[in-house]
Amino acid sequence: MDTTTTENQSDIQRVADQRKLHTMAEISKLMKMWQQSENIHSTQKESNNQNYQMTAVGYISVKKEIVTAS
């Protein structure tokens, strides 16, 4: 049996396995960044909705004070 061929095949397999692991790690990072981006988007959207609600309440209360003052 030729050990040189076996060693070369082992080296090729090791390089292929490292590439697979690297690709899986990159995909994992990408998925985490995507999830964090979605979380940030949800938080910003919720915050914007709360700001609109506060603005509406503030506007109504100011309007009531104007009517009361009249």
Image (cartoon, rainbow, N blue to C red):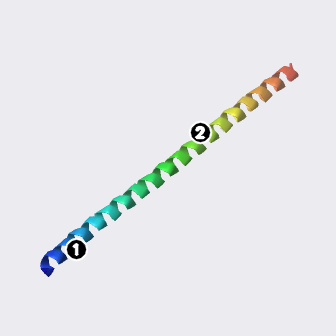
Please tell me whether residue 45 is drawn above or below residue 14 in the rendered image: above
Which structural element holds mark 1? helix
Q: Disc 2 residue type?
A: Lys
In the shown orientation, is residue 8 left or right of residue 19?
left
Q: Residue at x 19, y 71 (%)?
A: 9
Please tell me whether residue 39 is drawn above or below residue 26 in the rendered image: above
Badge 2 or badge 1: first in the primary sequence: 1
Question: How crowded is the residue under tag 1: few (<14 C-alpha within 10 Å), some, or many (20+)?
Answer: few
In the shown orientation, is residue 34 left or right of residue 65?
left
Corner quadrant of residue 64: top right
Q: Which numbered dot is residue 45?
A: 2
Q: Residue at x 65, y 35 (%)?
A: 49
User: At which x and y percent is residue 58?
Assistant: 75, 32
Q: Nearer the viewer, residue 56 or 11?
A: 11
Which residue bears the numbered disc 1? 10
User: At which x and y percent is residue 50?
Assistant: 68, 38
Distance from Cα at disc 2 to Cα at disc 1: 52 Å
Please tell me whether residue 52 is drawn above or below residue 7 in the rendered image: above
In the shown orientation, is residue 35 left or right of residue 10?
right
In this rendering, the label closer to the viewer, 2 or 1: 1
Q: Disc 1 residue type?
A: Ser
